[in-house]
Image (spheres, helix red, strand yellow):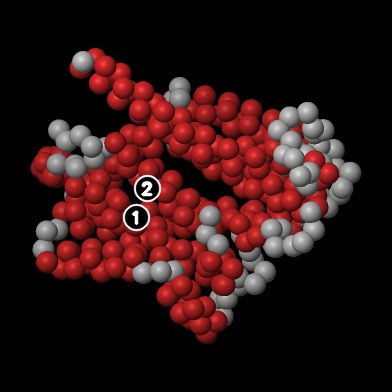
Amino acid sequence: MKQFRLAASRFGIHATLFVTIVLTSVPFYWAAQNSIKFTRDTIKSTPTFWGFSVTADPYRKFWFDNQEQNMWQVGLFFVVLIASVATLALVRKRFITTWPFTLAIVAAFWIALTVFPKIFDMNREFDFFVNSIFVTVFTVIISISIGLLAGYGLARYSGLSGAVILIVALGFRALPRTAFVLPYFFVAKELGILDSRLVIVLALVAINQPFTIWMLRSFFMEIPREIEEAAMMDGATRLQAFRMVIIPIMWPGIIATSLFTMLLAYNEFLFVRVLAVTEWTLPVAISALTGGDSAGTVTEAAAASVSITLPIIIVILIFQKHLVKGLGAGAVKG
């Protein structure tokens, strides 16, 4: 009887996971399928799941000015980029000092973003994609830098003022974003930074900061104080103990928090739409394709959706090991 209950429990868990995977992956599969279809196949009354003609026109229309752009050349560019980054990553594992190779990988992506529009005749959407990367990267860097110091201080300080700060931060996080967007708009207008990347980064850092502080504080709470106290007894200052002892232990938690912050910033729509008139990010640019009456924009919107999703999938796959460690760090105490 016990074995039957165990088998039934496992079946229920696996069935639930299967249904969840189907429900979450089918929309992306449908968008990916529409992104390589001709418009005539997407507007049929009967959905076409297979047996349709494949085309790269939706991607060509969304990204390139030249409607005759050879997509094989674009694919070759990305193959060279991926091969270069993979080579640097493999070589990086063989050395104790890894930061030069990390900088080289970052430089490779930066060079690719700079060279790509010079090689190919790109649409304005590529500028929006660059804006998305710029806003996301700087939001994550600033948010995590502030969140580390604030989370560490609040985890080690048990006074009443620390609890008040946490409650106030949670209260601001619980408020709807519409309560902040207009004040940010008027302040940015008075400061003369409206319609710029700077105001978007500042706004996203402000609204996401309570989340990073709370999440990083929870990770700091799991690290015993004796570890840093032992380092300080050996002659390290508190800052040195924090940088050389606590941060390496916290690395999975930092990556997990960074990924969640990245998703919040990368997918932001409301603040970018209100605070930027021309300096849009890609989610706002994609919304312009879904509001028209023309059926021709359906495939183009699908191509845009797949394009904006693929970088997130790649980043999650690269850091999935650290993400699982970070999310599970608070589950076991020892």
N-terminal-most mark, 2 or 1: 1
Q: Which residue is mark 1?
A: 212
Vertical arrangement, residue 149 with respect to residue 321, above or below? below
- Of 211 and 288, which appears nearest the observer? 288
Q: Residue at x 80, y 41 (%)?
A: 41
- Farthest residue to the bottom: give it: 190
Q: Residue at x 53, y 54 (%)?
A: 266
Q: Amino acid at mark 1?
A: Thr
- Farthest residue to the front: give it: 1
Please, what secondary structure does the residue beneath circle 2 have?
helix
Q: Is residue 198 left or right of residue 119?
A: left
Please, what secondary structure does the residue beneath circle 1 have?
helix
- Of 34 and 6, which appears nearest the observer? 6
Quarter of the rendering occupied by the C terminus: top left
Q: Which mark is residue 257?
A: 2
Q: Position of residue 241 (x, y in %)?
A: 21, 45
Q: Is residue 280 left or right of residue 42?
A: left
Q: Which mark is residue 90?
A: none
- Of 240 and 322, which appears nearest the observer? 322
- Of 242 and 153, which appears nearest the observer? 153
Q: Residue at x 43, y 46 (%)?
A: 259
Q: Amino acid at mark 2?
A: Thr
Q: Residue at x 24, y 40 (%)?
A: 330
Whether the residues at callouts 2 and 1 have beta carbons within 8 Å, the answer is yes
Q: Position of residue 248 (x, y in %)?
A: 30, 38
Q: Position of residue 215 (x, y in %)?
A: 30, 51
Q: Is residue 334 left or right of residue 88?
A: left
The answer for how far apart the CA atoms under marks 2 and 1 are is 6 Å
